[in-house]
Image: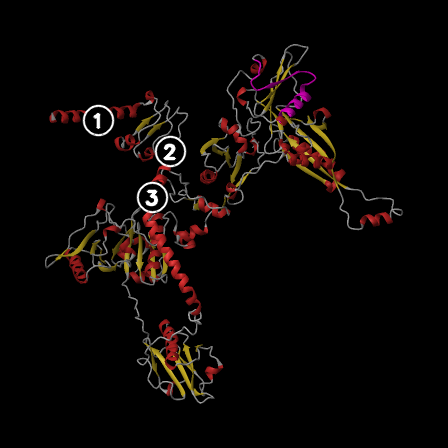
Amino acid sequence: MLVDIVQFKTAIILYKFAIYIYIYIFLADNVSIFRLELVNSRLLCYRCGKLKKLILNTNRLITLPDTIHFLTDLETLDVRENPDLVMPPKPPELMNGANMEFYNIDFSLSHQLQLAGAAPPPSSTETTRKRDPVARLRRLRRRRDSQEESAKVLKGMQDVAKEKDSTKSSGRESAEALKGKRWDEALERPDLDYRDIYDEDVGQIPGLAVWEIENFLPNEINDALFGKFYEGDCYILLKTFIDDSGSLDWRIWYWIGGKATLDKKACAAIHAVNLRNLLGANCRTLREEMSDETDDFLDLFENGISYIEGGRTASGFYTVEESDNPMKLYRVSGQQNLRLDSCPVDVESLDLRYVYLLDCNQRIYLWLGKKSTLMLRSKARLIAEKINKNERKNNAEIINIICGFEPDEFWEKLGSRVDKGKIKEWVPDNWKPPSPLLYKVGLGMGYLELPQVELPQHKLSQPLLSTRAVYILDCHTEVFVWIGRKSPRLVRAAALKLSQEVCSMLQRPECTTVTRCLEGTEPHIFKLQFAGWDDVIAVDYTRTSESVQRRGVDMKAIMQKDKIKTDLSALFMPRQPPMSAEEAEQLMQEWNEDLDGMESFVLEGKKFVRLPEEEIGHFHSQDCYVFLCRYWMPLEETEGGSEKAGSEGEEEEDVAEDDFKCVVYFWQGREASNIGWLTFTFSLQKKFESLFGSKLEVVRTCQQQENLKFLSHFKTKFIIHDGKRKVVRAEGESAPVEFFHIRSNGSLLTTRCVQIQASATHLNSEFCYILKVPFDSADSQGIVYVWIGKRSNAEEARLAEEIADDMYGESHTLQILSEGEEPENFFWVGLGGKKKYDEHAEYMRYARLFRCSNEKGYFTVSEKCSDFCQDDLADDDVMILDNGQQVFLWIGRKTSDVEIKLSFKSAQVYIQHMRNKQPDNQRKLLLALKNKETRNFIKCFHGWGKHREVPQ
């Protein structure tokens, strides 16, 4: 029976394995026949880790697992015809700039909110805790079980309260005794013994005593040296005298030399205070500095004071003598991994194909071979900068020497001079540097061990070095002894001897040296042997040596200086609230009251003619219009002005009238050429300027970009037609179908009736539409439908009826249709057939348009007003459109790559911000290219049509 069970389990495992192999084949070929909705993450990550081709087109995929980003060998991924597919976000560790840094800009939401002065984002851990009724019952049961313990606690609290009542009376009596002491009364002098520092009879005899600081302690000097101060020393001076009461009193000074060391200065101040504590004096210790002494201090010396150069006493600090390193010559080679090989300090070591570094302590020479690459020269310069910074304290001078222009001092260092043509290419072309060997010094059973350390991937790395061990690194021309900080002393002592034996075992060049390195103080020549060991600065090896000389080598300082300025504050501002109908009506009434008159002109041919009264408010996308508006400007009267005018009214016949101002609005349709503007500039504008002079103002406006004051003069009846004003049709040609959409963006003042393409897909239940369907019969020109959506505004429905009656009431049959009551004959025929349309316009309550540009010299994001239109999409910028469900990144054809990348990061920051502000609307980021916009993008714009092409 047991054998049967084992055989059965084995068969199941083999069956599963066969299924996985079958899936591999199908995944690599075609998976569309499965109609998949999800893909198992284990299958992609663990079973298909080496997958190269994955075809998932024509499925019902909703998303893909995150492990899709970890398929490093994947070459082909086909996910076409999956309409509901949403690609998973890339894990942070795989993203460029996982720390939210992009173009040296921190695009993290918290940082950008801080720059914008907005509130920080809420923490993701702050979640509302849901009440659990079962857990509440458990807590109540535990309370019943612990009633006895609670009774004990309550009894204890009662006992404590009784004790407090009993001690209240006694506490009042002892309140004064418990009163706190003053701060000076509570001070207690420390019990310190200064007899080892000062003599017992110090300060007991009137007169002057002087001490000098030597090795951290005061040392009393002879009277003959009073008034003679060394510039490198510090002194303590004590003056003892008898005061008026007949008791001893003291005054204490400490004198600081101009060239004194830090330990002497500190000890002089400390021991001056110690002297005051020893004597119990109430005086202060007075500081005197060289060349700035007070008169009281100078009065101590009858013969004055004098300064002596140098110092009489030694410092208590250990002094470190700088070692004088021998002169060395290194050959710089390598492309990706730089290498420095020690060479004999001789002219014959030079090769035209390399760069040589001559280290002379305070001078570092870089000899640039004639055939050396620019990359090699730049790397050698950076290495010299690092050596100067780490090992020379930035005191060394780096000198670049070009082959053929060597100074005499360079040849003197090499021992002889050689002509330019005699420098040979002596290094073989197939020369390869020997691989370094790393040995670990250890203690065996009574003897030393020197095992070789195995190098992973044949490369040295810093983690191989343990702080508890000592290593010997053999680089053929250099032998290094690396000593860890926690290594045993015995191993340290033996390592140097072993390194000398290792150096002498093989045949090496005479210039080979043994260098001792302590952990944390390694020379840069040692660090170059290890891959990725560069703890000094971030280096960009693409820079030239001239750039390094001009701007330095500290990339952090350069990046901070060149940091790109950004302004993303508009993304965190709240959406502009819509204007109320009452406020819009009030503004419309005030602006029309100020309007004294308006004259209208339209461009016909090459001149402007007056526009008929019945056509005022009707605009055509291929025409240009001019409106001359005269506004009254009331004069402001001062106090008493009316009385003065009344008293002198009999003498003055002329009474001051209100001033006026003329504004000329030039309106240009989206499809109109700039010829109309040029014609206006050289004709009507000059005429108006001669009539009104400085009181004239010219405003040029384009279609659907009108200001509110101009729109208010048409009282919400602003109608935009397609095409030209006067169209001559051929004989027998029928009139086209006309379809108008009435919509206001953020205010009643911005209400427009724009002609759009006649299609049922453009209908929406929240708007009103006007549809004109022409007839071929002669008695009536056609029928006009006013379609009113079931969720539309009643005021817009009334306005739609009035506009339709004004345009077609006399010549067409007018019919009012509510949504759902459409006739099957003419209405749907005029719209090209009945089609599915939107029943909601939620995007009207969320729509926002941002412009991303660097025209100011830095990257900035600005928001367009709520009354935006298609022409606000600038071809040389990137736009961000938010409709409440999706965030579109619209890219113009003339946009730079920098703007695209920065706009993409800005859109991500905006989505994070809005997800915190509106968690119910989880927006998705989508791409929209010019002339390839989707329906969800287009419907946010009123009257969408073809993009206006700017003439080149």
- Mark 2, residue position: 88
Q: Is residue 640 left or right of residue 488?
A: right
Q: Was residue 239 drawn as part of the magenta stretch in this picture?
A: no
- Percent position (x, y) of residue 305? 44, 83
Residue found farthest to the left: 446
**Distance Cα–Cα, label 3 vs label 2:** 51 Å
Closest to the observer, 547 or 136: 136
Q: Is residue 615 visible?
A: yes
Q: Which residue is mark 1?
A: 17
- Provide the residue span drawn in magenta: 796-823
Of residue 875 and residue 274, the one placed in the foreground of this image is 274
Q: Amino acid at mark 3?
A: Arg
Hey, what amino acid is under mark 1? Phe
534 horizontally vs 573: left or right? left
Counting residues from the start of the chain, the first of labels 3 and 2 encountered is: 2
The residue carrying mark 3 is 144
Q: Given this view, does label 1 or label 3 mark the residue nearer the observer?
A: 3
- Spatial separation of the CA atoms under disc 1 and disc 2: 29 Å
Is disc 1 placed on a helix, strand or loop? Answer: helix
Q: Which secondary structure lies at badge 3?
A: helix
In the image, residue 259 above or below residue 441: below
